[in-house]
Image (cartoon, grey):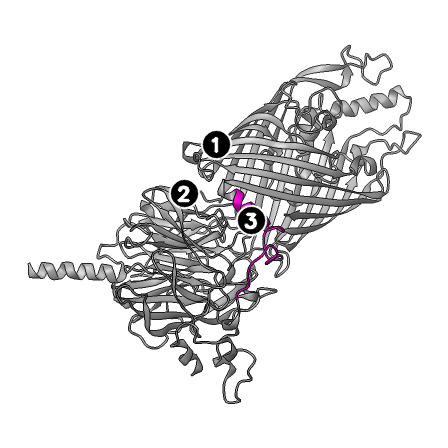
Amino acid sequence: MLAAGAAMASAGSVQAETVLGATPPAELNPAELPEADLAVQAKPADQWTGLLNRSSLLGDMGGLRSSLGQHGITLGLSETSEYLSNVSGGLKHGGEYHGVTTLTLGLDTQRAGLWEGGTANVSVLDIHGDSFSADHVGSLQTASGTEAEATTRLWEAWFQQKLFDGKADVKIGQQSIDQEFMVSQYAGTFMGTMFGWPAIPSYDMTAGGPAYPLSGLGVRLRGRLSDQLTMLGGVFAGDPAGTSNSDAQQANKHGTAFNLHGGSLWISELQYGLNQPGDGQLDDGKPKGLPGTYKLGAWYQTARFGDQRYDDTGLSLADANSSGNAAQHRGNYSIYAVADQMVWRPAEDSSRTLNAFTRLMWAPGDRNQISFSANAGVTLTAPFDGRDSDVAGLAVGYVKVGNHLREYDQDTATANGNPLYPVRRDETFVEATYQYQITPWWQLQGDVQYTLKPGGGAVSSNDSTQTQRIPNAWVLGVKTVITF
Amino acid sequence: MKSLFRFSTCLIGMSLLANFSLAEDTLPFLQGIKKHTTLTTTVPDNGDQNPYALAVAPVSAGSVKAGDLLIDNFNNAANLQGLGSTIVNYHPDTKQLTLFAQLPRDLHNCPGGVGLSTAMTMLKSGWVIVGSTPSNDGTTDTKGAGCLVVLDPNGKVADVWSGADINDPWGNMAVIDRGDKATLFVSNAGFGVGSAKGNPPVMNQSTVLRLELDIPAGKPPLITSRAVVASGFGEQADKGVFLIGPTGLALGKDDKLYVSDALGNRISEIWDATTRTTSAGIGRTLTHDGMLLRPLAMTTTPQGHLLVTNGSNGKVVEIDPETGKQLVARWINTNKAMTPPGNGNLFGITMNAAGDGFYYVSDDVNTVVLAK
């Protein structure tokens, strides 16, 4: 009855004091009382309102973000921090902290009142802490994709324009191509470096290629050939660092070298979306398979690349009579394939999905340190009820040392009269991880890694006899990402 | 002549009453759509985000021109749900976006304040009625019961309606507008909904409320009667999308009201919608499952088909209410950052003034799109 009476009331007739605090008479069914939230009072929103529920820690930044938004500008700021510790094997036990702060400014030309379809992006990195893998593990597949030399550097600075009604776009400027090429959607969950930018480009492209923390000037074209097929292609400065210093990150310490010497890098990738809808696609309701993405790509770099075994006179570089100048090869190249496939979900709208990925790459073994790399793994999103944004994963990585480098090691053994000198062949890396989403803006990740034959089975620097490989290593890690 | 006159009067009447035509069901409306054009960002100067309701102005009044598209925002600048307080106006002729109204967050007589929902309409008399499903922290933990707010055509608050039968007026409105009188249907999805923490229960307490309005010349509408015509739909607090409950309402032939029952994954039909004095419960099932995946907002095509947006993927589904058959679906948001693509991105949908296309919001990128 009370509900019916209140229902006929106009604004303000239902007063809070009738709802809360009073004990209902015994004959009144509490279910018939008006809802308690009729008495909820609005509270003014301030900078800290809803801190645990919003997508970024600083929200509107006291009005800064919305003010910038009026001019089409978006501001992104995030901090990634990691602590990794070698607990067994490797080169040295113990841990290191490192992290990166990323500041990104984006401009949408349409929202800025200019023209349609234009996007500009500038990002700056502040990399801090100490690198871990080289000193502690000695692995090829390093423990974290965040590891880099401490500095503050310009990362990307590019402009992208949509063309032909959005069917194509062109991107010009300083780019980090690991953001678009060879990307595996599901591999990105893992901390290991090679699940991001893989081993072959990392070791075989000059200075590791235009990829984090470096970037290179270039032009990239993307065309949507159909709802399923997309073609990516680009040409970039072949040496993102400049060659004045053998340490690429030192040579281009602040990301402002804008080097155009050292040849050019041509790269192309064909992407196929399986069971993935296109905008405007009609659906007749027939069951579809699970979505996947498959990519085939290749790159070619113009420049000269030193042989991994022979010098310019045909002698092994390990030979005492070698000139020490590696024989030169014209150009370098690689082919690769990437597959991401959802393999199970209990229902179409379920957050819980089981996903698999793999990436395979090949490059010639005469001029490259790594001639084959592969990684594969599975991820499970929403592994527990109520944890929709968490991800658990298990992955494995494998790299094969190029045949000329392997033979160089054999030559070294012979030259030194040390038949027990370890020859580098391959390295296997296993990682288990769990990403826990504390709040929408704060992610915590625990990680366990095992490296079999670190460095490809390289000789341990701790071994004076030069006969022992670096011991297999266990690494524990924790990572946190905060979006401000 | 007399019989012809009668026939055309009948046609006009039916069209006015139910936005229905007698056209034969031919090709699905969605098959005739050729292009999706992003018209505008929906973010006003105060940074409000997450566009929800869409309403095409039936008349020119105040700052609104006939054919203008009103869009409200559910989130504030910090992207907190249930704190959006603005309605923007997209002018198709000039392609400009202006602010129509910015309501005070602590609007008097609106329990919990203002967080503008998918419930919004503009009447021929120029009054705009919009629902509030407010929160103090972006979750249902602090939600208020909300209200319906009456705005004049210049965006000024003229009245606030709340009461025990209004609890988070959530879904898009179905309206019969006769000028000086109107019938308004609105769903309430807040009764008994608590925190979204853990695994929140489904509460079967959601209602569809019918409000009869009297609209004296030059004065705000007055509620002359109110009746719950349907009740017992599922509703649930949700960490991601605030709450899930019946969202779409549309009127059809034979005095039927269609309700998108999101949690039931079905479209329900309520008979005698304008005349019944008792609740029809959750109504009869017109269609369920199939291409529907958490059906949300709903509108009616000129041939009388229902267009329903899915909450859990980026599809709009066309349904023939005569047969209950799901004719076809069209992907209108394929953002692959979500699983399935477009999950959680679609909300408001409404036909354009010409009836040859429809507007919809992509709330992942705060834009409104015209499909035609």
Q: Is mark 3 on a helix, strand or loop?
A: helix
Q: In this view, does A351 lie to the left or right of B319?
A: right
Q: Which quadrant does the C terminus of chain B fall into? A: top left
In this view, the residue in front, B312 or A457, is: B312
The magenta stretch spans residue B311: no
Q: Considering only vertical position in the picture, is B151 above or below A93?
A: below
Disc 3 and disc 1: Cα gap in Å? 29 Å
Q: Residue at x 63, y 47 (%)?
A: A484
Tell which of B204 and B154 is nearer to you. Answer: B154
Q: Of label 3 and label 1, which has the lower sequence position?
A: 3
Give the chain letter at badge 2: B
Residue B173, percent from left and from top: 36, 62
* Magenta stretch secondary structure, dominant: loop
**Foreground of the two, B187 or A13:** A13
Secondary structure category for the residue under label 1: strand
Tell me, yes or no, whether the two marked residues, 2 and 3, touch with CB atoms within 8 Å.
no
Question: Disc 3 designates what residue?
Answer: A63
Is residue B273 at all visible to an observer of this figure?
yes
Crowding near pointer 3: few (<14 within 10 Å), some, many (20+)? some
Q: Distance between the residues labelled 2 and 3?
A: 26 Å
Q: Mark 1 points at which residue?
A: A161
Q: x, y percentage for residue A92?
A: 86, 39
- The residue segment tinted magenta is A42-68
- Locate residue A23, reporting x and y percent: 56, 84
Give the residue at x 50% y 89%.
A27
The amino acid sitting under disc 1 is: Gln
Residue A62 within the magenta-colored segment of the rendering: yes
Amino acid type for the residue under numbered disc 2? Thr
The residue wearing badge 2 is: B38
Amino acid at the residue labelled 3: Gly
Q: Position of residue B190 (x, y in %)?
A: 48, 68
Per the model, the C-alpha gap separating discs 1 and 2 is 16 Å
